[in-house]
Amino acid sequence: MVGQRVRTRFAPSPTGYLHVGGLRTALYNYLFAKKMNGDFIIRIEDTDQTRRVEGAQKDLIKTLEWAGIIADESPEHGGNFGPYVQSERLDIYDRYCRQLLEDNHAYYCFATHEELEENRQLQIKQGLQPKYNRKWLPEELGGSMPPSVIKKKLDEGDPYVIRMKVPDYVSVWFEDIIRGPVEFDSSTIDDQVLMKSDGFPTYHFASVIDDHLMEFTHIIRGEEWLSSMPKHLLLYEFFGWEPPKVAHLPLLLNPDRSKLSKRQGDVAVEDYIRKGYSSDAIINFVAMLGWNEGEGSEQEVYSMEQLIDKFSLERVGKAGAVFNVDKLNWLEKQYIKNRPTEQLVEVIKPILQAELEQKKSLMPEEVITSDTYLEKVIELMRERVGFEHEFVTFSSYFYFEPETYDDEAVRKRWAVDTNALLREFTDILYTLEEFSADNIEAHLKEFVVPKGIKAAVLIHPLRILASGVSFGPSLYHMLEVLGKETVIRRILTGIEKISVPV
Ligand code: GLU
């Protein structure tokens, strides 16, 4: 393996959505491969045909690509080690299974489901850990089943599975990059089924064969697979293959430190995409679930390039990582705050265009849809939104005339003379040659001071008339962006609609 090009893989089963834990596994595999100038590969593990969901494979790859995790080889894009879908590799598994049978590392087992279940219950009753009782272990492998009985069953075409023969009394040892040395006693390992009665391999068998044939140098996956390692290592030994290096990632936890579950929040990446999180924030967030750069680093916001540069498996912790959505929301806000305006324009433009198209009938003729106008809106709203799509929802008054006015605010902010004052001030606005925030502010002050009234007397009604709502960015800047004509039109049409208290 020395000097070999690093190859890692993400090997999901196409059973539906992409779990955030799956995204983290994919990301760590990707980061590690890229950091080492190696290749990242996607392999689809669909050997459990009962759990296969139509379309899931395409969706998984699409979601990963959305996140910026682009595979060098995959079922969609091909490569030199294909096919990358296990159900298309059945002849390969069959061949290797024959070899194990010939070498006496595997055997046929004709036990029925009922028999196995009965045996399991009995062992549980006896306080033993359930394990296959080796009834079908052939005589030549140290069992008690005569070859003639096995041959007869095969000739009769009875359904069977093929099991691996786990050697007795050996210790299986390996070094996990994250966990350090791990040891298992072979007596705790079951004679794992390698081939099922439907002719499909089990996960364990197929993944070992493929990991070897596809020349992976490092296997990075969730902690739940740690206990499978001894079975896998025995298979490598049977074939005389060198096993790849392994790293098992810590569990993801709910904030109460129980195992991350759907019951306490969304676990599908697709749910977060639907809610409007950006791929940058999600990747940043998921990267930190178990990894950190190390002492002395205060950095919390990382781009994909920075993650590739800084990532190392040695800095992945063993302890469970808490999945805290507040942290994700905070990151999302950071991205919006710091993202260059031109980039935000590119993201928001299509969302805005769809909205404008939908509300076409409500649009005044002079609606401004230029990029420069959008840039100004973004600059004003940047601090006030939590998601990119909120630029459109919270900024709708920059594009559409207010249809209604916040009733409660009107009741609170309007006095008998408010409309008259607004009319008078509008006359001043007409005269302004420079419709800038500073100039509007200066003229408003100049207007209210001699009258002995507070600026707030006009500020609030102006905001409500211009936007329909009582909150938003700095009023003067908002008026500047809306522009003189729009502001005056909105004030004058608005006051007609507002009933003044008597
Ligand atoms: N197909 C397995 C899964 O769904 C892959 C486990 C592995 O990476 O070996 O997680």
Image (cartoon, rainbow, N blue to C red):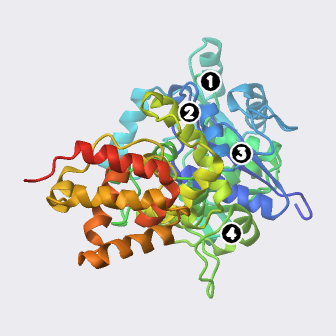
Q: Quadrant of residue 253?
A: bottom left
Q: Which residue matches tag 2?
A: 136
Whether 124 is drawn above or below 109: the answer is below
Residue at position x 18%, y 59% in the image: 414
Residue at position x 49%, y 70% in the image: 439
Asked whether residue 322 appears in the rendered view, the answer is no
Task: Check disc 1 and report its element: helix, strand or loop.
Answer: helix
> What separation in Å lies between label 3 and label 1 (alpha carbons)?
27 Å
Task: Indicate which label's residue lies in the foreground, 3 or 2.
Answer: 3
Q: Earlier in the sequence, mark 3 or mark 2?
A: 2
Q: Residues within 10 Å of mark 1 (few under 14, many from 20)?
A: some
Task: Indicate which label's residue lies in the foreground, 3 or 1.
Answer: 3
Q: Which residue matches tag 4?
A: 313
Asked whether residue 256 appears in the rendered view, the answer is yes
Q: Which residue matches tag 1?
A: 150
Q: Earlier in the sequence, mark 3 or mark 4?
A: 3
- Looking at the rendered structure, the kind of residue marked 1 is Ile
Q: Which residue matches tag 3?
A: 208
The foreground one among 91 and 374 is 374
Q: Are marks 1 and 2 in contact (CB under 8 Å)?
A: yes
Q: Earlier in the sequence, mark 4 or mark 2?
A: 2
